[in-house]
């Protein structure tokens, strides 16, 4: 349950954070009752703290009475140092310019992929990923690219979980998925065909720091254009490698001036 289960002796800070944590990509707008249910806190407590968070602009209440995350939280988020997104964004734009397709950047967070950036064109196929959103790892191209470069113990733990099946094409058999991840690691990129969403396919490449993936770059096209994916692999790999070099330079303080 987001925000944690019902507890005793929780501090005011933990309760306020639990309220903010009740919101996610699947629940961007919540009523007080829904917040109480998702946090396990008493409705009276949620009412009081939500009012304080609204006053501080961490929450914003709409005309229908539902709450959503306020701009103050967004402002604070902009202060968080993020060299990965900063160095990657120009590369994502370059890939979009060269292909005209949706491009996104994701990192692993727990057993999910967290999308940290996205660029897209007017004619690109609609996709379910959104900046700040999360999706399972195994049905997504970026997720497979990340998972393939995780330590063996993590992969085994992931495959031992009950795996979500968003579409009939999603690969959920542990043995088959393990073989595909080994292939991804060997060839340096991953592909999917209608595994996360019917009507779309993808290719993704890891942003490597040594033998670990710190992020993955993905590109998505309509399923009827799946035969075009192979021509996108080389530019995708070039961009992932470029981001890796610039990211390493950024974190070591030797940023390249241009690419």
Image (cartoon, grey):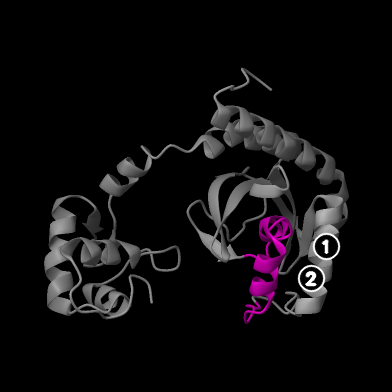
Q: Note whether 106 is above or below 3 in the view shown.
A: above
Check disc 1: other Cα within 10 Å, few if <14, some if 14-19, many if 20+: some
Residue at image mark 2: 178
Name the foreground residue: 44 vs 225.
Answer: 44
Looking at the image, residue 148 sits to the left or right of residue 77; the answer is right
Q: Secondary structure at mark 1?
A: helix
Q: Position of residue 182 (x, y in %)?
A: 83, 62
> Which quarter of the rendering shows the N terminus?
bottom left
Circles 1 and 2, Cβ within 8 Å, touching? The answer is: yes
Q: Nearer the viewer, residue 230 or 245?
A: 245
The residue singled out by tag 1 in the image is 182
Where does residue 210 sit, x and y in percent of width and height?
Answer: 71, 42
In the rendered image of this protein, does residue 7 appear above or below residue 137?
below
Residue at 31%, 41% in the rendered image = 75
SS state under label 2? helix
The vertical placement of 206 against 247, above or below, is below
- Part of the protein shown in magenta: 137-165
Instruction: Kindly indicate the quadrant of the structure image that contains residue 150.
Output: bottom right
x 48%, y 38%: residue = 82
Q: Which sits in the foreground, 228 or 146?
A: 146
Residue 114 painted magenta? no
Give the tally of numbered discs.
Answer: 2
Q: Is residue 164 magenta?
A: yes
User: If the image is split into quadrants, where does the C terminus sit?
Assistant: top right
For the question of whether residue 56 can be seen, the reply is: yes
Which numbered disc covers residue 2?
none
Residue depicted at 39% across the width and 68% down the height: 27
């Amino acid at each position: 349950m987001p925000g944690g289960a019902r507890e005793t002796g929780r501090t005011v800070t933990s309760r306020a954070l639990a309220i903010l944590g009740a919101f996610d990509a699947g629940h961007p707008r919540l009523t007080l009752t829904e917040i109480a249910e998702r946090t396990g806190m008493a409705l009276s407590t949620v009412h009081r703290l939500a009012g304080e968070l609204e006053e501080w602009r961490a929450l914003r209440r709409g005309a229908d009475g539902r709450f959503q995350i306020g701009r103050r939280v967004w402002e604070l988020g902009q202060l968080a140092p993020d060299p990965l997104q900063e160095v990657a964004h120009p590369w994502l734009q370059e890939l979009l310019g060269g292909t005209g397709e949706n491009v996104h950047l994701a990192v692993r967070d727990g057993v999910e992929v967290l999308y940290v950036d996205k660029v897209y064109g007017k004619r690109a196929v609609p996709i379910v990923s959104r900046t700040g959103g999360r999706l399972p790892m195994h049905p997504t191209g970026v997720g497979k690219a990340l998972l393939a470069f995780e330590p063996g113990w993590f992969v085994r733990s992931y495959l031992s979980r009950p795996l979500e099946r968003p579409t009939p094409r999603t690969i959920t058999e542990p043995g088959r998925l393990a073989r595909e991840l080994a292939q991804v690691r060997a060839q340096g990129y991953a592909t999917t065909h209608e595994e996360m969403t019917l009507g779309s396919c993808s290719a993704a490449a890891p942003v490597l720091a040594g033998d670990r993936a710190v992020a993955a770059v993905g590109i998505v096209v309509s399923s009827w254009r799946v035969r075009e994916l192979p021509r996108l692999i080389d530019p995708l790999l070039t961009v992932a490698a470029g981001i890796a070099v610039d990211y390493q330079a950024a974190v070591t303080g030797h940023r390249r001036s241009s690419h």
